[in-house]
Image: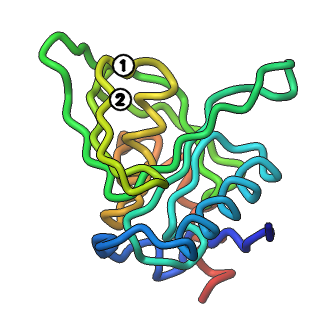
């Protein structure tokens, strides 16, 4: 396994739409395992392939807290697609991102979703009634696959408050 470089705000790769994964290969599974290792090292709960410079539809998520004694429970999702469940309510929670370090801002997202994806064995999966941080991570990481970032969803007031930090971060890339 290898630690990968996490791309940060201002990197063009984060704004590109990612391509569909046609076939799950051993190389892609290894990439996913490297992404998990990178995510754990960075103390994140999700990581999308664009964040490590690959524009493919692949995300890894693990909302367990190994520091608190929880066992790791990773999800490797190729080509994830989510939809809001009919009884979902909007939920506003402070959100951050490994690609936008040190910025945490309230973001409103659906509170309950269903996700469909292909797992690391190439099998189709569906998980219903995803809630809490798991639902949020699915949506946040899926946004990355479409070239979207959580700061695209914030209020004008929060954007104004964080504009100088974002410009400074983007300038480092420029």
Residue 117 position in % (x across, y down): 32, 47
Residue nearest the observer in this picture, 147 or 153? 147
Labels 1 and 2 touching (C-beta < 8 A)? yes
- Point out residue 87 in the picture as x, y percentages from the top left corner: 17, 10
Earlier sequence position, callout 1 versus callout 2: 1
User: Compared with residue 12, is residue 39 higher up or lower down, i.e. above or below?
Assistant: above
Question: The C terminus is located in which quarter?
Answer: bottom right
Q: How is the image coloured?
A: rainbow
The answer for how far apart the CA atoms under marks 1 and 2 are is 5 Å
Which structural element holds mark 1?
Answer: strand
**Can residue 17 be seen by looking at this rendering?**
no
Q: In this view, does 25 lie above or below 59?
A: below
Residue at the disc numbered 1: 91
For the N terminus, the image quarter is bottom right
Q: Residue 147, located in which quarter of the rendered image?
A: bottom left
**Residue drawn at x 51%, y 59% as measured from the top left:** 48
Can you tell which mark lies on residue 50?
none
**Badge 2, how many Cα within 10 Å: few under 14, some, many 20+?**
some
Q: Residue 128 falls in which quadrant of the image?
A: top left
Residue 11 rendering spot, x and y as whole percentages: 54, 79
The residue at the point 38 percent across, 57 percent down is 122
Residue ID at (41%, 22%): 92
Q: In the current view of this chain or complex, which residue is farthest to the left?
A: 86
Label 1 Cα crowd, 10 Å radius (few <14 / some 14-19 / many 20+): some
In terms of secondary structure, where does tag 2 sit? strand
Residue 23 in view in this figure? yes
> In the picture shown, does residue 149 fall above or below 156?
below
Question: Mark 2 = which residue?
Answer: 108
Q: Residue at x 49, y 54 (%)?
A: 120
């Amino acid at each position: 396994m290898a630690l990968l470089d996490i791309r940060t705000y201002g990197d063009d790769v984060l704004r590109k739409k990612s391509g569909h994964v046609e076939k799950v290969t051993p190389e892609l599974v290894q990439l996913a395992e490297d992404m998990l290792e990178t995510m754990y090292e960075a103390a994140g709960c999700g990581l999308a392939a664009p964040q490590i410079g690959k524009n493919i539809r692949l995300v890894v998520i693990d909302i367990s807290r190994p520091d608190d004694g929880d066992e790791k429970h990773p999800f490797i999702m190729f080509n994830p697609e989510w939809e809001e469940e009919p009884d979902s309510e909007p939920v506003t929670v402070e959100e951050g991102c490994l690609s936008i370090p040190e910025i945490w801002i309230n973001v409103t997202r659906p509170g309950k979703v269903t996700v469909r994806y292909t797992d690391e064995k190439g099998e189709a999966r569906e998980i219903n009634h995803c809630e809490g941080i798991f639902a949020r991570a699915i949506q946040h990481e899926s946004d990355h696959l479409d070239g979207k970032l959580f700061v695209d969803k914030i209020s004008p007031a929060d954007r104004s408050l964080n504009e100088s930090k974002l410009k400074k971060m983007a300038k480092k890339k420029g």
